[in-house]
Image (tube, rainbow, N blue to C red):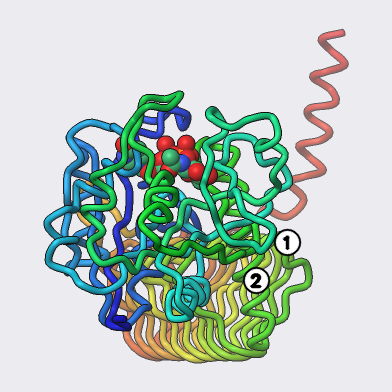
Amino acid sequence: MSASPPLFVVLAAGKGTRMKSAEPKVLHKIAGRSMLAHVLETAKTIDGAGLSVVVGPEMEAVVRETRAVAPGAEVFVQTAQRGTADAVLAARSALDRHSGDVIVLYADTPLIRPETLQRLQKALDAGANIAVLGFRPKNPTGYGRLVTDSKGTLLAIREEKDASQAERQIAICNSGVLAFRVPKINDLLSHIGNSNAKGEFYLTDAIELARAVGLVATVVECDADEVLGVNARDQLAAAEAIWQTRARLALMRDGVTMIAPETVWLSFDTKIAPDVVIEPNVVFGLGVTVEEGATILGFCHLTGAMIGKGARVGPFSRFRPGAKLGPDVHIGNFVEVKNVSLGAGAKANHLSYLGDGSVGSKANIGAGTIFCNYDGFNKQKTEIGEGAFIGSNTSLVAPVRIGAGAYIGSGSVITKDVSPGALALERVSQEERPGWAEKFRTLMTRRKAEKS
Ligand code: UD1
Ligand code: CA
């Protein structure tokens, strides 16, 4: 029998009414990536595999997502939702062209692992014609039950609505993931009828039909977490939690310290190097890289940022796309960095907005410094040279350049470029009136007494 690469058929045509969403269900995200993309990425890990995605009518957004994640995938439209067997048959022409194994995946079951797909293929290699991925959920309500004989051979899958009282007691359930190695899968599926409680064409009926023509079906068991099906928002949150737990564990195994891992939120593409220490309550949005030995103190929020080797950021710092921190940069509390690169050892330790521009190495940005980057129409750049010292409460009105090693006096509003090594001050010079305070108090005390 064939051990050539399989064809994956990913079912994504469901409306997902229980999500109560304007968006198709399979585009809802886990760790910042759609459920559909999670499934497609997993399928793509199997070398040479073909990909067919079955979508519902008017699901352009699902088609776009498919094209973006798996440009080689074929998209098929299931015109009406007549059940899972009918959905697979929407990809009939791809099935006709393919002679190897066929594996059906659900786009609303996003946590399945590549190793599990390989176990299904092994079950086929061991002689089964159909391998069904089964699991034992804490609460089996709503799932199809796997009916087996005393030797564990799979006899049938019974949907809950069609199951007898005795069948409902079965603990092992259908995940929905099925692998086929049958001569003509289209023929087998075409024989499936719809005389059942829902009046749908059930893919699960393939088991009994296959057995009737002498084919063998078997069960491969996996962890319940891996095949959690997402039908509603609480399950979406549960799937997110499972994904996060997995990802945190993987990072810790790779040498990342997390003091309270359950409070650190990661995205699918977060990259964190060994010996990074992450304090509690840190959120990594999309596109973040953290290099070796950096420390992320509590309550930081990062997206599209690069944190260099040995840098120390937080607590309470925010990094937005284009924030690029060189080695040993320090960013402190209530500092927001967007689209700014900072050279090695630069510091901005308190209460600042650094938006659009660059900061040279070892420059020091005082508390309350603002890059005034926006005039209501355009964004402009602030460029600060190496070793420059920006006094506290400085407004740098972009476009503006501060030369290397220059000093800016506190409280200045800097609108013109400053030469290297210069001191720039922009404020009224201080005046002093000796003895003024005592005279003022005496005057005010007298006036108050006169009134009462
Ligand atoms: C299905 C299985 C059930 C299993 C459960 C696991 C059948 C008949 N039942 O039930 O045994 O325990 O999944 O979660 O297969 N879809 C289409 N077109 C359709 C119908 C469904 O593309 O016409 C897609 C959906 O988008 C979804 C998947 O198929 O991705 C499963 O459909 P759903 O209606 O959620 O099936 P369940 O009732 O959950
Ligand atoms: Ca489902």
**Residue name at image x 68 percent, y 84 percent:** 253
Q: Is residue 323 above or below residue 334?
A: below
Front residue of 224 and 196? 196
On the question of residue 393 being in view, the answer is no
> Tag 2: residue type?
Arg
How crowded pointer 1 is (Cα within 10 Å; few <14, some 14-19, many 20+) is rated as few
**Residue name at image x 69 percent, y 29 percent:** 165
Pointer 1 residue Cβ closer than 8 Å to ligand 1: no
Front residue of 87 and 248? 87
Query: Which mark is drawn over residue 248?
Result: 2
x, y (%) of residue 232?
A: 52, 35
Quadrant of the drawing holding the C terminus: top right
x, y (%) of residue 220?
A: 57, 66
**Residue name at image x 58 percent, y 35 percent:** 142
x, y (%) of residue 22?
A: 34, 30
Circles 1 and 2 in contact, beta carbons < 8 Å: yes
Q: Is residue 121 above or below residue 352?
A: below
Front residue of 322 and 161? 161
Front residue of 164 and 285? 164
**Residue extending farthest top:** 452
Circle 2 sits in a helix, a strand or a loop, which is it?
helix
* In this rendering, position of residue 296 left or right of residue 40: right
**Residue name at image x 45 percent, y 76 percent:** 127
> Tag 1: residue type?
Glu
> Which quadrant of the view contains residue 8?
bottom left
> Which quadrant of the view contains residue 70?
bottom left
Circle 1 sits in a helix, a strand or a loop, which is it?
helix
Quadrant of the drawing holding the N terminus: bottom left
Query: Which mark is drawn over residue 66?
Result: none
The numbered mark, 1 or 2, whose residue comes first in the sequence reads 2
Q: Which residue is mark 1?
A: 262
On the question of residue 16 being in view, the answer is yes
